Image (tube, grey):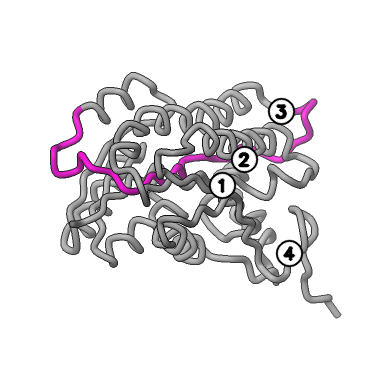
């Protein structure tokens, strides 16, 4: 029987890489994204490999999430995996200079969006039972403070605690929960954070040899395919050049 995975935020970065990795392995996909053109193009491409269903929506929109999940086609009814990937960071200014709208957006996406998808899909995951998995994308920012992280780091600390507590609530169902915490990874995420500033984006990764979205996708694929009696509670994943947080990056010395 073909397994089905639900991936939020699938139009770029980790989400897109996961969609490609699971499609390659023959999993059926339910993919969400805000950018309709990108999402439809990805689904059209991956539909040549497997069954794909696109949900053009914003995970912050509870009503849209409720309606979309309630009306999933029958062939996507049974769910083996949920990858809560949708999330973002906006800006790196210190707290006194931040825009409250940016803070609202991060909380609504990183916290509420993850809550909505999890709660709405739990009945399907519990029905699947043993071996079903939830992977929540946290961040090392939820563990290690650095200037400019404030609300973003706090949302990822929430993801960690939500994941660990959810694991307790799901005891006896067979559903597994993992909090995956990437470090420095080269993706569109940083370009969004820097409001499209390409020079700042390039400087972030210069000489750092960051991990790539494909590394995250491979890790998540491994997590979902571990034996059903194994639960990986939390997992940090960093490039070798990063020792702990955002500014602890080893870079080549300039002559």
Provide the secondary structure element on which disc 4 rests. Answer: loop
Q: Tally the marks.
A: 4
Residue in the picture at 86% in, 80% down = 255
| Region rendered in magenta | 71-97
Q: Position of residue 220 (x, y in %)?
A: 46, 58
Q: Gap between marks 1 and 2, in whole Å?
A: 6 Å
Dot 3 or dot 1: first in sequence order is: 3
Q: Which mark is residue 160?
A: 2
- Disc nearest the viewer among 3 and 1: 1
Query: Which secondary structure type mostly characterizes the magenta part of the structure?
Result: loop
Q: Position of residue 163 (x, y in %)?
A: 56, 39
Circle 4/circle 1 CB separation < 8 Å: no
**Is residue 6 shown left or right of residue 222?**
left
Dot 2 or dot 4: first in sequence order is: 2
Circle 1/circle 2 CB separation < 8 Å: yes
Provide the secondary structure element on which disc 3 rests. Answer: loop
The residue indicated by pointer 3 is: 98
**Is residue 195 shown left or right of residue 31?**
right
Local crowd at mark 2 within 10 Å, few (<14), some, or many (≥20)?
A: many
Provide the secondary structure element on which disc 1 rests. Answer: strand
The residue indicated by pointer 1 is: 179
């Amino acid at each position: 029987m073909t397994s089905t995975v639900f991936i939020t935020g699938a139009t770029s970065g980790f989400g897109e890489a996961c969609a490609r990795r699971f499609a390659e392995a023959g999993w059926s996909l339910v993919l969400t994204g805000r950018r309709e053109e990108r999402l439809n193009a990805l689904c059209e491409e991956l539909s040549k490999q497997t069954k794909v269903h696109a949900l053009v929506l914003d995970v912050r929109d509870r009503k849209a999430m409720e309606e979309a999940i309630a009306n999933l086609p029958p062939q996507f009814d049974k769910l083996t995996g949920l990858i809560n990937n949708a999330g973002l960071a906006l800006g790196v200014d210190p707290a006194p200079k931040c825009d409250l709208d940016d803070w609202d957006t991060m909380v609504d996406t990183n916290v509420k969006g993850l809550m909505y998808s999890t709660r709405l899909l739990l009945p399907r995951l519990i029905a699947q039972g043993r071996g079903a998995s939830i992977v929540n994308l946290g961040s090392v920012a939820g563990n290690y403070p650095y200037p400019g992280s404030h609300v973003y780091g706090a949302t990822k600390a929430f993801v960690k605690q939500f994941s660990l507590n959810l694991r307790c609530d799901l005891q006896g169902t067979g559903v597994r929960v993992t909090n995956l915490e990437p470090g420095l990874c080269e993706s569109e995420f940083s370009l969004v954070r820097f409001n499209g500033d390409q020079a700042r984006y390039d400087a972030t990764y210069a000489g750092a040899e960051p991990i790539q979205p494909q590394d995250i996708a491979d890790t998540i694929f491994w997590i979902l395919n571990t034996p059903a009696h194994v639960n990986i509670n939390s997992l940090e994943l960093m490039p070798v050049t990063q020792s702990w947080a955002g500014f602890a990056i080893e870079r080549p010395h300039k002559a």
